[in-house]
């Protein structure tokens, strides 16, 4: 027997599943019968296992590329330090918009990581350029922040604005919220880079 539902209201499939799961699994089945969860839950579980299996290798490759790019470990570590900061913005956004951390939100978080690394590379590369001109480290960081704040901020703003239509789609809402709030919060963190990176 397969069952489908038509949800009325703003309850997401993830919330509905969490609410009814315990009650359904408590039903005693006759001998020889078993209960299996399929549909979106099954597909999402399989997809998450596949992603988490390859996730460490992907992040390791990205980190190795940034190390080779700057021929240093310290600068890539500072660039990557902004990625966990995005989780603050993501958490606030999901709570504010009453959205679940679904599989699409996970994909949004992975995309967000790439965006933040790109912004960090742009900023640190400009700092290196300023240092090569003989500037004091503090002044180099300050001048780089001033010269790169506009392109980094404009890239973040256009991405955030481009995600607005997805906020009204039930399937893509959590991904849009993750990218919008995470990118907005982490971009502010990147623009205020500390002197330690040099």
Image (tube, rainbow, N blue to C red):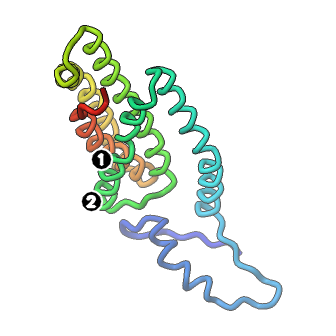
* Identity of the residue furthest to the top in this view: 133
Tell me, yes or no, whether the two marked residues, 2 and 1, touch with CB atoms within 8 Å: yes
State whether residue 15 is above or below residue 136: below
Residue under the point 54% across and 39% down = 59
Residue 75 screen position, x and y as percent = 38, 29
In which quadrant is the N terminus drawn?
Answer: bottom right
Q: Around disc 1, counting alpha carbons within 10 Å, would you say few (fewer than 14), some (14 to 19), or many (20 or more)?
A: many
Residue identifier under label 2:
96
Residue 185 screen position, x and y as percent = 26, 44
Residue 178 screen position, x and y as percent = 37, 48
Residue 69 screen position, x and y as percent = 47, 20
In-image side of 50 versus 182 (left or right): right
State whether residue 141 is above or below residue 112: above
Using the rendered view, name the quadrant where residue 155 is placed: top left
Label at residue 86: none
Numbered disc 1: secondary structure: helix
State whether residue 99 is above or below residue 187: below
If you read the primary sequence from the N terminus, does the residue marked by circle 2 or circle 1 appear first? 2
| Nearer-the-camera pick, 30 or 177 | 177
Residue under the point 42% across and 48% down = 175
Residue identifier under label 1:
181
In-image side of 134 versus 128 (left or right): left
* Identity of the residue furthest to the right in this view: 32
Residue under the point 19% across and 18% down = 136
Distance between the Cα atoms at labels 2 and 1?
10 Å
In which quadrant is the C terminus drawn?
Answer: top left
Number of callouts: 2
């Amino acid at each position: 027997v397969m069952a489908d539902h038509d949800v009325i209201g703003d309850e997401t499939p993830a919330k509905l599943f969490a609410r009814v799961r315990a009650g359904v699994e408590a039903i005693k089945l006759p001998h020889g019968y078993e209960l299996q969860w399929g549909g979106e839950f099954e597909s999402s579980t399989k997809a998450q296992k596949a992603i988490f299996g390859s996730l460490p290798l992907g992040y390791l490759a990205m980190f190795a590329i940034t190390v080779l790019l700057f021929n240093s470990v310290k600068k890539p570590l500072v660039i990557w330090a902004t990625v966990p900061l995005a989780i603050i913005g993501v958490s606030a956004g999901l709570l504010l918009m009453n959205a679940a951390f679904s599989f699409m939100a996970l994909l949004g978080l992975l995309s967000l990581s790439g965006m933040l690394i790109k912004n960090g590379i742009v900023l640190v590369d400009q700092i290196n350029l300023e240092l090569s001109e003989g500037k004091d480290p503090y002044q180099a960081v300050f001048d780089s922040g001033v010269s790169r704040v506009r392109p980094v901020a404009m890239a973040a703003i256009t991405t955030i604005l481009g995600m607005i239509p997805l906020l009204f789609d039930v399937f893509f809402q959590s991904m849009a919220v993750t990218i919008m709030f995470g990118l907005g919060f982490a971009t502010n963190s990147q623009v205020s880079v500390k002197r330690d990176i040099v």
